[in-house]
Image (tube, helix red, strand yellow):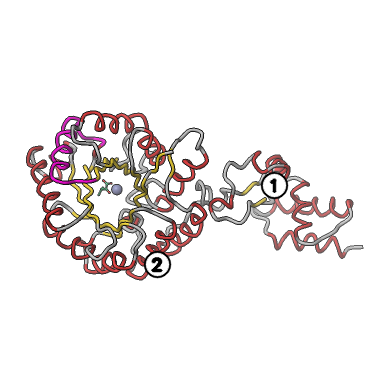
Amino acid sequence: MARVNVFDTTLRDGEQSAGVNLNRLEKIEIAKQLERFGVDIMEAGFPASSQEDFDAVKEIADTVRNCSVTGLARSFKSDIDAAWDALKGGAQPRLHVFLATSPIHMTHKLKKTPEEVVDIAVESVAYAKEKGFPYVQWSAEDATRSDYDFLVHIIEKVIDAGADVINLPDTVGYTTPDEYAKLFKYVKEHVRNIEGVTLSAHCHDDLGMAVSNSLSAIEAGAGQIEGTINGIGERAGNAALEEVSVALEIRKDRYDFHTGLVLKEIKRTSDLVSKLTGMQVPGNKAVVGRNAFAHESGIHQDGVLKEATTYEIITPKMVGIDSNNLVLGKHSGRHAFKQKAESFGFELSESKLKEAFRAFKELTGKKKEVTDEDLFAILADKQTEN
Ligand code: KIV
Ligand code: ZN
């Protein structure tokens, strides 16, 4: 089974989510948890963007020892200098330098010809290597809307200049799983000096395909996947790392790849990121949402009580959640109700239990959410009634 490296960008692309602003201490707290979670590389920020970001990246690089800390840089010497000053004390300093390669970006944003873009990219990578970075990742921003043969040409040049990792971002979340796989295969087959170089996938979720696209890239030869906790990030966000890693684990029959992530740290990491960024996790979010292990309908509750795998493909414990949750609502049945009463310590006769169940059903018609307190009150009433 092949190992895929995990590049976490919660503290950089994740922090680019609208409305998110982490201070230095919050970033350090998240970085320590990411280290416990077992990411291979963490992108701690964009050192040239502000003094605060520089300080946070530097402190994280100086503190974290079990993974490679990286920082983002545009293809400017001043950005690379700032990144080196922030990262040089790290265990495995790594630069992440990028330049756009799509016709749309080269024409309208960079206002450069393709050959000018090649020269700038080569210079930036060569400069980073001269500066002392042992690892340099080069990203072809908007790769999925770039010309394949231009990508092959520029990638060969930046590898000659010393790039160790080539990232092919789906910057605007435009690609589909089959197209993204085709791009990775094309680059692998056509770039003459690709041997020994890691290809990386970086997906955005504008069309809701970031996780599927990442899995597809892994199958097509990506040795590294990039993403964030809870899928936070620019616009609709990035690939959710907890989803990609759990998919690889649960579908081992399908994917012959694994990550070094400690899956039981998922819930804790998700909660911390949600708390410090203020980005709430939607209730129905895969793996970490409040309802990811909640069963409401009587048929499902009955199935799960008999054998959890009837309706649960992920064990809650695997991702650091104590147990599943049988939510009592209007679709719930007597079986789960009885189990709840027992869990509270009530031992009601069959007839009292029936009455309590009827009272509970009546309440579901009046209240959207029946809480444990409501249930307790109903059961206590029946117990004390003559
Ligand atoms: O989405 C993107 O293209 C990026 C780059 C900086 C790698 O985040
Ligand atoms: Zn991105």
Residue linked to disc 1 = 330
What is the C-alpha distance between the residues marked 1 and 2?
41 Å
Mark 2 lies within 8 Å of ligand 2 (Cβ measured): no
Neighbor class of circle 1 (other Cα within 10 Å; few <14, some 14-19, many 20+) is some
Q: Is residue 158 magenta?
A: yes
Horizontally, is 96 left or right of 207 in the view? left
Q: Position of residue 142 (x, y in %)?
A: 24, 40
Taking depth in this image into account, of 134 and 249 the one nearest to the observer is: 134
Q: Residue at x 24, y 35 (%)?
A: 145
- Quadrant of the image for the C terminus? bottom right
**x, y percent for residue 103:** 16, 36
User: 89 and 107: which one is in front?
Assistant: 89
Mark 2: secondary structure: helix
The tag earlier along the polypeptide, 1 or 2, is 2
Disc 2 designates what residue? 29
Instruction: Give, as a three-letter code, the residue at label 1.
Output: Lys
Image-based side of 204 in relation to 307, left or right: left
Q: Dot 1: what SS?
A: loop
Residue range of the region highlighted in magenta in the rendering: 144-164
- Residue 244: x and y, percent? 44, 44
In which quadrant of the rendered view does residue 52 lie?
bottom left
Q: In the image, what residue occupies the spot 21% across and 35% down?
A: 146
Q: How many marks?
A: 2
Q: Position of residue 16 (x, y in %)?
A: 31, 56
* Image quarter of the N terminus: top left
Q: Are marks 1 and 2 in contact (CB under 8 Å)?
A: no
Q: Is residue 312 left or right of residue 224?
A: right
Question: Ligand 2 near label 1 (Cβ, under 8 Å)?
Answer: no
Helix, strand or loop for the magenta stretch, by majority? helix
Residue 42 forms part of the magenta stretch: no
The disc label shown at residue 184, or none: none
Crowd around label 2: few <14 · some 14–19 · many ≥20 (10 Å):
some
